[in-house]
Amino acid sequence: MAHIRLGELLIDAGVLKEEQLKKALTIQKETKSRLGDILLESKMITNEELIDALQMQLGIDFIDLSTITVPVELARFVPRNIAKKHCIVPVKLIGDTLYIAMSDPLDFIAQEEVKAISRKKVVPMIATKKATEQVIEKLYGSEGTARAIEDMKREMGKGDSDIIPAQLRQSADTDANAAPAIRFVNSIIERAFVEQASDIHLEPQKDEMAVRMRIDGLLHKVLTVPSDLQNTVISRLKVMGGMNISEHQIPQDGHAMLTVKGHNLDLRMSVMPTTYGEKVVIRLLDKSSKMVSRASIGLDAADEKKYEALLQNSNGIILLVGPTGSGKSTTMCAMLTELAREEVNLVTLEDPVEYDIDGVNQCQINEKAGMTFASGLTAILRQDPDIIGVGEIRDAETAQIALRAAITGHLVVSTLHTNDAPSAVDRLADIGVEPYMIAGALKGVISQRLVRKICPHCRKAYTPTAEEQQLLGMQADSEAVFYRGEGCPECHHTGYSGRQAVFEILMIDQKLRKMISEGENAAHIKETALTDGFVTMQAACRKLVLAGVTGVDEAIKAMNSTVEGN
């Protein structure tokens, strides 16, 4: 079988043409990439076609890695460097035979390496490249985590039940000689980064501590820690975050920086006492990530025109509204990135500073030192600013200073917690801002939510039920077509992969400005705006469902989150 070439095999299977192979081989000479990767990236073939062809021609079984849990002990048969080099993961051991999942089962050199290292018979199995890479990261991360837990247990068994500050204060590296608690914490953070989690939750329970990660907006349990080790782990996190390790009765906040796979992570920590011990939540912010842009936040053509019109203002205030976790900070970053020019002085006041923006003077809130949004904003106005970014309007004083700045010739961009765009007017009035000031300063309000996107690899069309159409506010239509993800290895059988923002943008024109100055409430403002083409969150969600971007369940969740504000 060693003489078989992938290109010839795919041609024999009828999924690749001679011309396509020649083109791919030319690219391969230039890039030195794997032929299979080139064929997939250039969309000459699909993953399904590749797998089917390999199965048919070679008689090799396909394995869906998302449906199995690979035992951690198998990692010792295939070293991490070999696994990553050849995209190989051991999946099971039966007697003297080691089964390995490979994205390229024609890589016979890799198979021979595994044979030599493991001293086992090797049977290849086919798996997708993405699934294999994901399992590699999980398996070898879990191996390190498991080893660290065992080492912590041994230390406890020696009588080291108390935390040794000197050990815990070692540098945050992943060296094998580092203290077990350090290695354990680092392995959790690394796994969260690889799986693109936004938050890590460490939750003490009666008999153990659960570790959950928020991925695509949902929490997933990834592992548990024996309860007798939880204080050691939490103490390590406290040391990293600069918190008091001897204090267990009051909430604490901390901050740390850690480099993972060449990326500088900003870790924001919150510790809260609970019935079974202290709970820790860690927010991960990637300081090395590419800056977000207008193109990346998910605006459709109509919304982009409104977005562009808002950015053309030289004064006034633009508000970004929505609940926590709706993507407001990301959209604000995209706006400020676009507004940052050499000829303007752009200053921000944030808590925390989530993105580093070139050409922008960014200031961090420090309430302990007296640097609040109100005091910081007052100081910024003495810095000759043209554009001001305010992380959040939380109180009357901050709101009044921000709106006064907007009226006096500055462009202000800020966030506010409200359910929908029209409710921003009521919210500002509720915290004590006069209607005339709101009317004079407000240029527009962008309300947004995040919805999960249907996995493109398993997306299928279907005819919706009358009930589904009704939930979306549609008339029953037998010809309507909706989409859903059926679940596949690429999306871990969730049917969803990634998230996208959905918007409603309220532009403040003269008619609405007059209504605001007269003290009209959000309901009347919304009613008037609808007659002038205002697109609500509900309508925007329906549009995404009909376009096959998201599913009915995600749309309804986003729509229901605005009901209170209607």
Image (cartoon, rainbow, N blue to C red):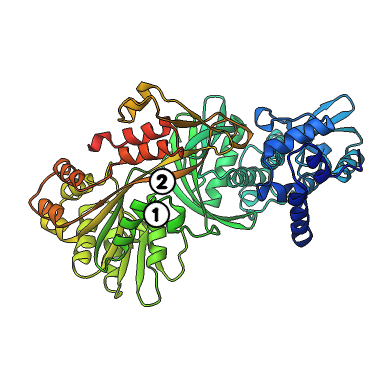
Relative vertical location of residue 543 with respect to residue 468 in this rendering, above or below = below
Identify the residue at image location x=46%, y=68%: 358
The residue positioned farthest toward the bottom in the image shown: 343
Identify the residue at image location x=33%, y=30%: 472
Identify the residue at image location x=47%, y=54%: 296
Q: Which residue is mark 2?
A: 501
**Quarter assignment of residue 456:** top right
Relative vertical location of residue 192 with respect to residue 62 in this rendering, above or below = below
Whether residue 472 is visible: yes
Left or right, 281 with respect to 310, comes to right
Q: Residues within 10 Å of mark 2 (few under 14, many from 20)?
A: many
Where residue 164 appears, x then y in whole percent? 63, 46
Front one among 346 and 259: 346
Check residue 198 in the rendering and tell me which mark sits there, or answer none.
none
Q: Which residue is mark 1?
A: 331
Mark before the other along the chain sequence, 2 or 1: 1
For the N terminus, which image quadrant?
A: top right
Which amino acid, by three-letter code, is at mark 1? Answer: Thr
How many marks do you count on the picture? 2
Which amino acid, by three-letter code, is at mark 2? Answer: Ala
What whole-number distance in Å separates the C-alpha atoms at marks 2 and 1? 9 Å
Label 1: which secondary element: helix
Front one among 7 and 417: 7
Where residue 465 appears, x then y in whole percent? 40, 22
Front one among 19 and 73: 19
Where residue 136 appears, x then y in whole percent? 71, 41
Q: Residues within 10 Å of mark 1 (few under 14, many from 20)?
A: many
Label 2: which secondary element: strand
Report if the CB atoms under discs 2 and 1 are less than 8 Å apart.
yes
Front one among 313 and 367: 313
Identify the residue at image location x=44%, y=48%: 253
